[in-house]
Amino acid sequence: MPSEPIITVSGLRGIVGESLTPAVAARYALAFADALPPGLVVISHDARASAAELEIAIAGALSQAGFEVRLAGAAATPTLGILVRTCGAIGGIQISASHNPPQYNGMKLFSAAGRVLPSEEGATVLARYRELGQPESSATGSGVAQEVKNATRLDDVRSAHCEAVLQVVDVERIRAKNFRVLVDSNHGAGGPLAVQLLQELGCDVIEFGTQPDAQYEHGLEPTEENLESVMQLAREKSCDVTFCQDPDADRLAVIDQHGNYLGEELTLAMCVERRLQQQIGPIVVNCSSSRVTADLAQKYGAPYVRTKVGEANVVDQMLAENALLGGEGNGGVIDPRVGFVRDSFVGMAMILDAMSEHDVRASELAAGLPNYSIVKTKLDMGAADFQASVDHLQGKFADAEPSQLDGLRLDWPDRWLLVRASNTEPIVRLIAEAKSRTLAESLCKEAAEVLHSNR
């Protein structure tokens, strides 16, 4: 029997043809639909080759269950949030495995508010999915509909999202700068909208992998090691700034005019500073994000709240705090003026807005931020094995202030370490930040040694 996909309260991911099949996708869609009132559901997907088959299975299952379906085709995850709202839908499903390797795909669930499903609602879907049992025993037989009724394709997927982003920046001021921008979408879903947005902002756009065809040029996470070829291209093209998206375009990494990787952590930080320069209000980030954002909140006198890792957790707290801005340090910026979804397009626009107002380059924006070195590593380890090692980790670093909000976070006055089991992969992530890279690397190494020795 095939293994189960990885399921969290906000979605599902698995290896296509193994843990994730059309029947599994249909079963999960029906579990989601079980708690919905009658109405319209919007379905979109990233550029992965397996998306088409999964789209048919999901749309067919919903159609047979009596729901009206709108198919958006290849679209960024934040775009789905906009579409759910503009279409007046009762929910949405994004078919994507985000940064997971190409053999994976997945499903992310959206509420009628156009945000990732809240944790409590996601837990209900998960419980219902378990109740439905294996696809072969479900009410749909194989779990896959043979035809799709009540489904139509949307003609204009991107315009509403583009317009929403343009509303939060000074378009004319940005246009006057005629920035030379390289955009790397790595053949994911974000390319067409990225080009459209940057052209609307008057940029001289250099495209790299903007066709959404999954012919990936490099690793799927927008990390420094995966973007070496893009950094070289940025130097060759003399770009003012380079924007790099992940496959479903909810994360953004930045490369400066010298071709230097500024990274995902500083994406959120630059946007936090830009927003706090305009207005003071609460900032919400997850507990794996750089301390730079906390320092910025302190600098501007803004309330600052940390949450568990996960977009749904951040959004829940943003709503509770009436937050000005939020996000995750993996390059995910959430601006309530556009939507409660991590949005690489908002990140691009806000950074260009800051560059145009202050008449600076990307490197100068970054240079004005507090300086830390952050190191992110991972180990192949299950959640159960990690949990058994928490006490050993805490004992190893007894001089730190511990928190088990999410995994184990250890704080010192000048550094911190977070060790937690991933929600989407059978791995443990280790993240450390300090004033020097050597010290951050040392923290990760010591923690990894404890985990290895206590398996």
Image: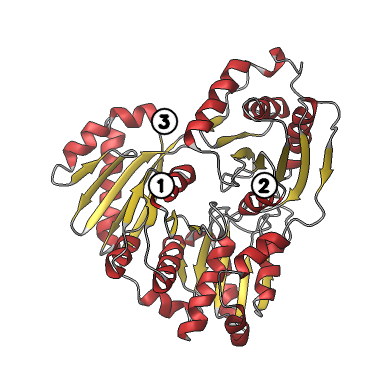
With respect to residue 372, does 99 lie above or below?
above
- SS of the residue under disc 1: helix
Quarter of the figure that contains the C terminus: top left
Other residues around mark 1 within 10 Å, as few (<14) / some (14–19) / many (≥20): few
Quarter of the figure that contains the N terminus: top right
- SS of the residue under disc 3: loop
Residue 261 appears anywhere in the view:
yes
User: Which residue is label 2 attached to?
Assistant: 84
- Which label belongs to residue 269? none
Q: Is residue 396 left or right of residue 14?
A: left
Q: Nearer the viewer, mark 3 or mark 2?
A: 2
Q: Residue furthest top?
A: 137
Q: Are marks 3 and 2 in contact (CB under 8 Å)?
A: no
User: Which residue is label 3 attached to?
Assistant: 382
Residue depicted at x 77% and y 43%? 70
Looking at the picture, which amino acid does disc 3 mark? Gly
